[in-house]
Amino acid sequence: MENFKLLGKKATRFGFAEALVELGEKYPNVVVLGADVTGSVLTSFFRDKFPDRFFSIGVAEQNATTIAVGLALSGKIPFFATYSAFSAFRNADQLRISVCYNNANVKIGGGHSGITVGPDGATHQALEELSLLRTLPNMTLVVPCDYIETRKATLAVAEFFGPAFVRFGRAPVPWFTTEETSFKIGKAEIFREGKDVAIVACGLMVWEALVAAEELWKRRGISAMVINNHTLKPIDVKTLVDAAKLCGAVVTAEEHQVHGGLGGAVAEVLAKNYPVPMEFVGMPDTFGVSGEPEELLVKFGMTWREIYSSALKVIERRDNKIGSNHVYRKVKDIAPLSNDIL
Amino acid sequence: MKFKKILFHNFVFFAITMEIFFEPKVFENKKRKPEEFAEIAKELRRDVIKSLLLAKSGHSGGSLGTADIFAVLFFGGFLRYKPENPKWEKRDRFVLSAGHICPILYATLARAGFFPVAELATLRKLGSRLQGHPALDTELPGIETSAGSLGQGISIAVGMALSDKYLDKNDRRVFALTGDGELQEGSTWEAAMAAGNYKLDNLCWIVDNNDCQIDGRVREVMSIYPIDKKFEAFNFDVITIDGHNYNEIINAFEKFINNHNNQIGKPTVIIAKTKMGFPISFMTDNYEWHGIPPNEEQALRALAELQ
């Protein structure tokens, strides 16, 4: 088990941008589309190095998404990146029909995601896109936890055929994984062993989960497992179910609305396979406001403190069997099985 | 009275069974005299009527109205393709952005030899490769992209043309057809802006300008006119034609091919003035035929008119 330490702070967008340059060198058919904010999402790195393979489309995200499909149907590997507010919502119909229904080899970068885009305010704080993208057939959805993992994720999505979305952010955030930390699309990684409660997190909340786990141990002697669930789709059912079986209580943590994102995805898996009490840490079904990233994470309750208190709450629910006193009759005794031939 | 009615229905049924036979005839893609296209377009229109009748739903108007354009594009030597090798890497590409008029595309592809003509009878049925709107995942030969949500196909065509002109630097051409109501989708103008900006002289955009959409006349639902001046402003070479006049259709495609060969640095748009449902007497220029199929009697009458 790797012992994670804070290595510094760096915005995840650098990981995306550096990976694009690497991919540009490796694959001559990797192309990048820009929608005016290339300096913000740092696709400018690729543009400056490979000007012939960079297409400026202007502030026209629907068009950029579908042009990317045309390039993909011509054998290219197009990456289109802008703010998540526009690369997942403004172009949602194009993602659904042209990208996913075509199963086109288009890779979307969602930059400036989450509340940590900060002072720009609610219009630019994409906090809903995971729920939308998660329902699209053929889509692979990755929310890396730090700068290094964003680089790995970006490199990884170029290696398979099909639509993919990589989410990253603008603000410097904790950087704690290394080149050696294992990363595989579709494989949730256990970042800390534990047996009392499982904390499943993605994005910058993975670091907060590690902090919460340490505090739970130091203050209460609670052993918390931390799972970095970077791939929301396809989701790693086995790791999640094993964690639920071992701990019997789960907390999810994400920089996203509490509805429909990572929490929803984990709840779907557990409800079907191994139901346990769950608590959800995330944006509480409201729009954001302007402020500094760290102020906003505190204001809307997306820090280790909320994970800590949610862990205590979910453990209490498990231990006191809250909500599970009802005795149900056994259905198998009611009618003959032959009635079930439909 | 009742007996008469039953007799009539039996007659209709018999007549339909006889008519619905899809003769497995294919047409060559070669330079032709204008008058030769009439026979091909008639066959395509008959296929459209028959497959829509069997499907019991679908879009008659635009499918019939564009048959002359499809006949010239696919069978006049303008679109280069190999039906026996649909993914031939030097092929020109045709993108149907107005996905709802796919019955005419399916008929055309079948008559070009991409797949058996008899398959036209499966339109919109469970398990068919002929989906209600074109679907890439059915792997129907000749389909370049899924389409159905209006405005998207044309941007895909722009992406293909970008790829051909700037990355692969080949001499392939991209043809795309949108409706005129489709131009109400804002993203079509994003596509126009990009095509003009990138000087895509390998792109031929055909606008099926029948002035009809589901709710009524395009000019009344939401006017998109003047179309030609809008495209001119986006740096297009604009050609306006009668979309039922073979001479004019041929000249328009020849002009585009010259534009491409001479690298004029402008995309071409062909604004084809057509009549929805043409030439069926009771469908022509009637927007109520946008999204419905003929019933048995209507199909018989239409097929009789297409003898």
Image (tube, coloured by chain):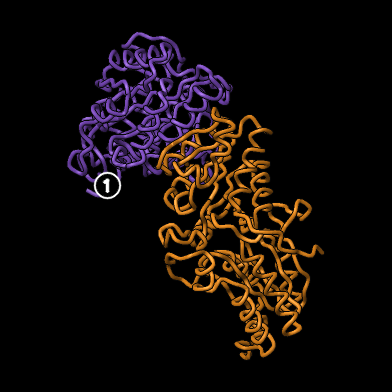
Chain colours: A orange, B purple
Question: Relative to residue B160, is residue A328 drawn left or right?
Answer: right
Question: Relative to residue B118, is residue A138 drawn left or right?
Answer: right
> Taking A306 as reference, is B283 above or below it?
above
Q: Is residue B26 visible?
A: yes
Closer-to-camera residue (A274/B283): A274
Question: Relative to residue B184, is residue A302 drawn left or right?
Answer: right
**Residue A319 image offset from top left, x and y in percent:** 69, 88
Closer-to-camera residue (B246/B58): B246
**Residue B237 image offset from top left, x and y in percent:** 31, 20
**Residue at 33 percent of width and 36 percent of height:** B189
Q: Is residue B43 visible?
A: no
Give the secondary structure at mark 1: helix
Q: Amino acid at mark 1?
A: Phe
Q: Chain of mark 1?
A: B
**Residue B147 image offset from top left, x and y in percent:** 44, 39
**Residue at 67 percent of width and 80 percent of height:** A332
Closer-to-camera residue (A141/B154): A141
Question: Relative to residue B236, is residue B219 drawn left or right?
Answer: left
Question: Considering the image in quadrants, where does the N terminus of chain A appear?
Answer: bottom right
Question: Considering the image in quadrants, where does the C terminus of chain A appear?
Answer: bottom right
- Quarter of the figure with residue A44: top right
**Residue B257 image offset from top left, x and y in percent:** 40, 14
Closer-to-camera residue (B227/A206): A206
Read off the residue under disc 1: B3
